[in-house]
Each structure stands twice: as C-alpha cells, then as structure tokens.
Amino acid sequence: MKKIYFILLIVFLNTNLNAAVKIDITRGNLEPLPAAVSDFYIDNPEKFSEGIKKLNLESNLPKVIKNNLKRSGLFYILDKKSHIQKPKLSHLKPRFEDWSLIKAQIMISGKIKIDEKGRLRVEFRLWDVVSAKEIEGLALFATPKSWRRIGHIISDKIYQRMTGEEGYFDTRIIYVAESGPKDRRIKKLAIMDQDGANNKFLTLGNELVLTPRFNPNSQLVTYMSYFKNLPRVYLLNIETGVQEIVGDFPGMTFAPRFSPNGNKVIMSFAKDGNSDIYTMDLKSRVVEQLTSHPSIDTSPSYSPDGRFVVFNSDRSGFQQLYVMRSDGRKVKRISRGKGLYGTPVWSPRGDLIAFTKIFKGKFYIGVMRTDGSGERLLTENFYQEAPSWSPNGRVLIFYRETAARKKGVGASSKLWSIDITGYNEVKLKTPSDASDPSWSSLLSK
Amino acid sequence: MPPIIAIDLIQISDKTQLPFAPKAKEIIEKIKEKEKERLVTKQAPPKIIPKEKLDAVPLPDNIKKQVEEKKKKQNPEEVKEKIRQSSEFEKKELFDPNKIAALIDKSKEEQADIQAKKSLDITQSQDNTVSLDKGLTITQEDAIKAQIFKCWNIPLGLPYDEDLTVRIKLQLKPDGSIMSSEILDHARMNKPGQGFYRVLAESALRAVKLCDPLKMPTTGYNKWKDLQLNFDAKEMLKG
C-alpha cells in the first residue's frame, strides 16, 4: 500500500514538474492589421476588349478592395511602392519573406481573365504571411461591368475571414440628396454603393422627401414624401420604379421602417397634435395601433427578432427612449441619462440600440444596450442625427450639418460613418449635400 | 572575319542587387539595424576565468590566512551559492535530511544574511524575488508578457461578451526560439459557429510567430522550456 502511495506521489511530482508555466496575455496592440493588396495579374490579355482594357482592372479592382478595408479601420494598407514581389508570382507562390519584410501580416493576390462565355473571372487568394499559408481563396464570375461588385464581395470575404463577422461592403446606401438655398431646398431620393460609387437619383426633386428606409430583405424602400403637400409614407421598388402609398390614413404619417421580415411597415400617425405608433401589414393591408398615449410617440424600430420595438416618446415630460413588445404591451423606459434622446435604431446584431442625443446644445450619436445600460457616446457635433446600422451591426452611418455663416449661407450637410468603438470616423463622398441615410442589407445574400 | 563583339565587364554584384522601392529600402535598413541590436544583446557574457597566481605558491602557514581573507572579501559566487534565489521545487532538491543539524546550527546566521540580501534586492529590482508556483518570477513573467503584447494585433471586431480564451502551448529552446506551438483547444477552431474563436486563435498564433525568438531568462531553462500562453482580449475589447 505504501508503495502505491509512493508511486502516486512520484507521478504527481512528475506531472507538476512537466506542467507548463501559464501566462495570461490580456493586452495587445489595437493598431489596424498591416495588409498588402497586390495588383491582380491579367491571365489572357488578348481576350480583353478595348473597353475592358480601359478599366485598368489589374489595379482598379484591388483599389476597390484596398479602400474598403482601409475605411473599415481594421486594416492598415501598405503602400504599393513597397511591394517587392511581382503580382503574378505573388499569386502563384508568394515569397513570404518579401512580404514579412515590409511588415505585412496578410497579403491579397488575384488573377483576372475573360472566360469562354465572355464573362469576367476573378480569382483571389488571402495569405497569412506570418504563418506562411493560404487561408482563403475564391473565384468569382460576373459581367465585366459588375467588376466593382466583385471587388466588394472579395472585400466582404476578407473581412469575414479576418474578423469572424459578415462584411458590409457589397451594400448600398439610400439617402436624401439636397441642393439649393435653405429656404428653397430641393430634396431628391438618391442611391449609391456604400463606397460612394454609382450614385443615382430616384426622384426628380419636385416633392420634399424624407427618411428613406430599406427593406431588410428586398430592394423595396419606404420613405415619407410631401406629394401634393400631403405628408405620407410611400413604398418604392428601386428596380422597377413602381411607387405606392402605404395605407389611407386621415392625417400625417411619418418615420416609417420595415419589420425584420419585411412584411410590415411600422410608422407614426399624427392627428390633432398627438402621434402614436401604427403598423400596416403590406399583404393584408391590416392596420394595427401599438401605442395610445396623449404624448408624441415616434421613430419606431423593430428588434431583429421582431419581438420588441424601440421608440421615442415625451410621455415623461422629456423625449426619452422606450421599449415595448411588438404588440404594444409592456412599455418600459430605457434611457436614463440627462438630455433628450431620439431616432433610436435597433442593431441587426440585436445587442445595441443606436440613438441621437441632445445635451447642452450639442448633438451626439451614441449606443446603449437594449435595457438602457452601458450608454456610450461615439461622436459629438454641432448638429448630427439619424444613425443607420451597417448590416453586420459594426458601423453606423448618419448625417452631420455644419453651422451656417452670417446671412444663412455656408451650411452643409454630409454623410459620415463611425464604427461602434468610436475610433474610426469617416466622411462619405456624395455629389451634393446629403442627409437621412439608410444602409441596405448585403446584396449578395 | 566575324566582327569583334565588345563586351563591357560589369561587376556582377551591381546587377544582382534588386532595386528596392524607397520605402521598402527604408524598412529593410531599419530591420537590419534592429537585427544588429538584437545580435548585440544576444552575445553571451564573457567567461570569467579565475586568476591564478603562478609565481607565488602559498606556504603552509599562509594558507589559513588566505582562506580567512577570502571569506571576508566580497565573493559574489560564494554568496550566490548560499542564498541563491530558487523556486520551492529547487529548495526541495537542495534539501538533505542528513544535514538537518548542520542547517539548524547555521540557520540564524544565514537567516540574517538572506534577509539583508533580500531587502537589498527588493529595493534594487522592485521585488523580483517573488517566485511563482512554477518557478518564474513576476518580473520574468512580465518581461515575456511585454514581448507578446507588442506582437499581438487584437482583432478589433470580436465580441467582448463571449468566452474566447485561446490557450497556446509552447516548447522553447534554450535560446528562447520556439520549437513547437500548439493550440490546446484546436478542435474548436473548425467547429461551425466558432468563427470568432478561429480568428482569435489565428491572431494569437501570428503573435507567437512574430515574437519568435522570445527573450528568455539566461538561467532556469527547465522552468520555462514549457510555456502556456492564455490569450484573452475581453478587457481590451471592452475598452
């Protein structure tokens, strides 16, 4: 018996001796990941028409990827001039020493060709330079004129592989394009890719348009328009151009949004100085009243599972945020801070609610948990509002106005984006002034 | 007669050196400088050769005196032998039950010496005497952490409310270079719905590779040849 104890003791001591020293690594650097995007090489240039040659796809397609990754704030793109290896060899067999020499931790290479059917075939590979291995590779086919979308889809794949989350680059943004002086402002509906390319106007600007919102599942848009001076909520199919009015309400309807499945529109309906929240089923056209309170209830937004609705109301005397069940029961105030809260939007991830806050004359864009805890103000400015989430719930887009100079001139309104860490604030390029942006879901979904 | 072809003799080295882009050149030079610095720090300390007085052989009467004098003099090697900082395990190894009586006799004298030396060490090197259960001091552990911190690019998109600790086991060579690295929960990387874990695990592996070789203590190889690094970005991501 003693022997057994002795052996056990020796085994115990041995295992203890062989056990590794454990060290907890709880800190690291939060710098963007150094990435190199090599030019893509053209596999069969003889099959490229003059028109396609002019697109300079070998450098412009990687440029779309570079700009997307850079704008995300998660990647630091190394200058092309520092690349040592040629694009063709980089794609076939990268010399990892050359890429690690310029401090790249990941590298993206690619090959472009025109296939037998005249389609553009783009192949890309994502390399982990430090581990010296390929970690992602894909070939995509499209008509040559869709080359930018290929760039966005590749960016999404890289983003997903490196962060674990879906990307948001193959998306579009609908917004209100503004021009003209303040008192005679022309407002048109406009749509563009998330990087500002392919800008198009959807309305002529004869009527005032406000608050366009994407259906999360289709290319349908809801917005408010003052057609014949009657403020009403409309639906617009951006592919067919067909437009229709939502419901026949005997008053003003505004602040519309789709339900997560896209079957309903939730909005405010104002009558006799009071506004409440209503929904309308787009198939059955059944209208349901969710709130019934003498205060102003507006800006409703569904949770992604469709079970709850967040909205703002001044029922406590000041404009605050409230959450209720989607049938209108169990209304609960969630915002507790000083100031006024408005334009709440539930994140597609379900974890946060974005809002605009007005406090001591300043405007803030912030986020809080769905129970109102953990409020974080991401950005502060003279005037900014209307946040809208990217489909992965990582980035917010909103609009910001600059103050006018004397005599009311010089004011401008532009679109900005900020990630939920609050570090990466980016101004979006639009051909004119812009407001009220809304982010689409992924087009390739 | 065929025409004579003139061939210019060019030094081959002029042509074979790849012309680097200006930025790359700068980077390469910086790296070279860093490598030079690293090499300097890597040099082993010069070997101490005890001085031998060949010309003077001590007479029998002088031998005792010399030994006494030697004891009075500061002799780092001898002191080190007595009060060397050692882990609990090492202390067990040094322990000899047959010498208990001798140890008791000397205990008071040694205690005083050790205390004096300890207090000196604490003030001089900010308590590097605190030994962890497996043998590395807090200062040594902090030095390893500091190296990894610099090499680890935390993936910024990760959620902070999930348990995503990645444990990597390292086997090190005596010079601090990594012999093998292994993710302990490797199977989790390929499970569906574990995308965030895979991203964190890959970033941790990159950090380990970027930090290779680690600058490790010059002594006690047995204590640190096996390391387990637990990567947890929760606190950093919470902000």
Image: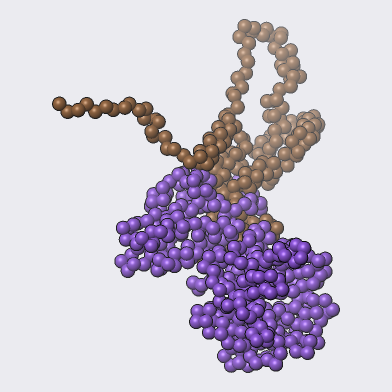
Chain colours: A purple, B brown
Q: Residue at x 79, y 76 (%)?
A: A319
Q: Residue at x 69, y 83 (%)?
A: A254
Quarter-of-image position of residue A279: bottom right
Quarter-of-image position of residue B140: top right
Q: Position of residue A117 (x, y in %)?
A: 32, 69
The residue sitting at the front extreme is A407
Q: Nearer the viewer, residue A83 or B9?
A: B9
- Residue A37 placement, left or right of B13: right
Q: Is residue A18 above or below residue A288?
A: above
Q: Residue at x 63, y 60 (%)?
A: A426
Q: Nearer the viewer, residue B239 or A77?
A: A77
The residue sitting at the right extreme is A317
Q: Is residue A36 above or below residue A429?
A: above
Label count reads 0
Q: Nearer the viewer, residue A83 or A21?
A: A83
Q: Is residue A275 above or below residue A134?
A: below
Q: Position of residue A78 (x, y in %)?
A: 53, 49
Q: Nearer the viewer, residue B166 or A201?
A: A201
Q: Position of residue B59 (x, y in %)?
A: 67, 7
Q: Residue at x 74, y 19 (%)?
A: B73
- Residue B219 placement, left or right of B70: left
Q: Position of residue A214 (x, y in %)?
A: 59, 77
The residue sitting at the left extreme is B1
Q: Mark yes or no: residue A281 visible.
A: yes
Quarter-of-image position of residue B80: top right
Q: Mark yes or no: residue A105 visible.
A: no
- Residue B197 placement, left or right of A357: left
